Amino acid sequence: MSRIEKCFGTLKAENRKALVAFITAGDPDLDSTKSILDVIDDNGADIIELGVPFSDPLADGPVIQASALRSLKSGTTLKKIIALVKEIRQSRELPIVLMTSFNPVFVYGEKQFIDDAASAGVDGVIIPDLPPEEAGEFSASADEKGIDMIHLLAPTSSDERVRMVAAHSRGFIYYISLTGTTGVRTELSDGLGDKVTSIKQVANIPVLVGFGISGPDQARYAAQVSDGVIVGSAIVKLIEQNPDPTQRDSKLAEFVTSVKQAISDLN
């Protein structure tokens, strides 16, 4: 049983919803990323999503784009991120998912990436520009190594698309709550519940909601209709606004705790 599958099994047994926290690896540097991950894990995150910085991201809003640029300037590479995961695995057991454009994986070498990521302790990958109809060989190799290939759905996804993603996703399905790029929003779509319900009718794995979840209230709303939430831009923004490590860690602990409390006891 994979760490992701085990995580969701525990959450289901305890009637809890998942909190996935996204951070850009290497922002402001890789040493800080490890410390930030420790704080987020200690304060209630169930899964960590590590963003791999890329100069031309597909769906990132300005907050995450800026963090990717800071990370690249600090010398972050995919190879260094995988090495960081290996280091984290010496003391942390929470599931770790890499979110990356396909280009860094292609440059790294697909098979080498899968082998190295699995060896380091990566549990899943999200590659927005590698859709299921193009990911057959990659997904098969990842599956052999115990890495879950997580695909995305959006409000505009057709019923046929939903069935395809449900059939090919492992770990969980990432439902994008809003069209457009990532970022902090003031409100989520009114049709969120209906769309997530329709996905859950054909999917046999958890469905999580991400994009635009800015705080506890939106997290609670999204978690009521799904299996959990993914929070990214709000966390990345806190990291950007608090360069002092002590202040940053305090703010992160407070924020993650507040979101975790908001999605508790909803079942």
Image (cartoon, rainbow, N blue to C red):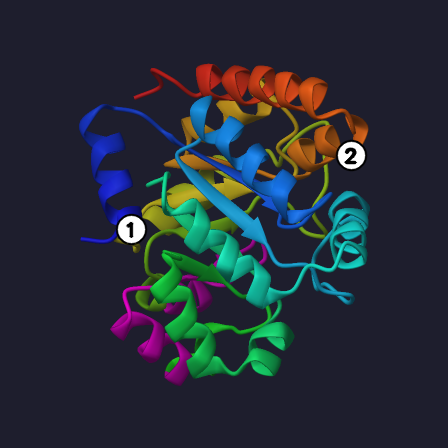
Q: For this rendering, which residue is in front, 201 or 81?
A: 81
Q: Is residue 122 visible?
A: yes
Q: Residue at x 64, y 45 (%)?
A: 178
Q: Residues within 10 Å of mark 2 (few under 14, many from 20)?
A: some
Q: Residue at x 59, y 33 (%)?
A: 190
Against 138, residue 120 (above or below) is above
**Numbered range of the magenta stretch:** 137-165
Which residue is identified by label 1? 205
Say whether residue 192 is left or right of residue 73: left
| Residue 24 image position (x, y, % from top left) | 64, 48
Q: Is residue 56 part of the magenta span, yes or no?
A: no
Label annotation for residue 246:
none
| Residue 105 image position (x, y, % from top left) | 56, 75
- The quadrant of the image that shows the C terminus is top left
| Residue 43 image position (x, y, % from top left) | 46, 21
Of badges 2 and 1, the one in the foreground is 2
Q: Residue at x 42, y 26 (%)?
A: 224
Q: Residue at x 27, y 31 (%)?
A: 11
Q: Secondary structure at mark 2?
A: helix
Q: Is residue 164 part of the magenta span, yes or no?
A: yes
Against 117, residue 33 (above or below) is above
| Residue 122 image position (x, y, % from top left) | 40, 57
Against 257, residue 105 (above or below) is below
Q: Secondary structure at mark 1?
A: loop
Say whether residue 239 is left or right of residue 134: right
Q: For this rendering, which residue is in front, 198 or 129?
A: 129
Amino acid under disc 1: Ile
Say whether residue 248 is left or right of residue 21: right
Q: Upstream in the sequence, badge 2 or badge 1?
A: 1
Q: Is residue 185 visible?
A: no
Against 177, residue 2 (above or below) is below
Which residue is identified by label 2? 240
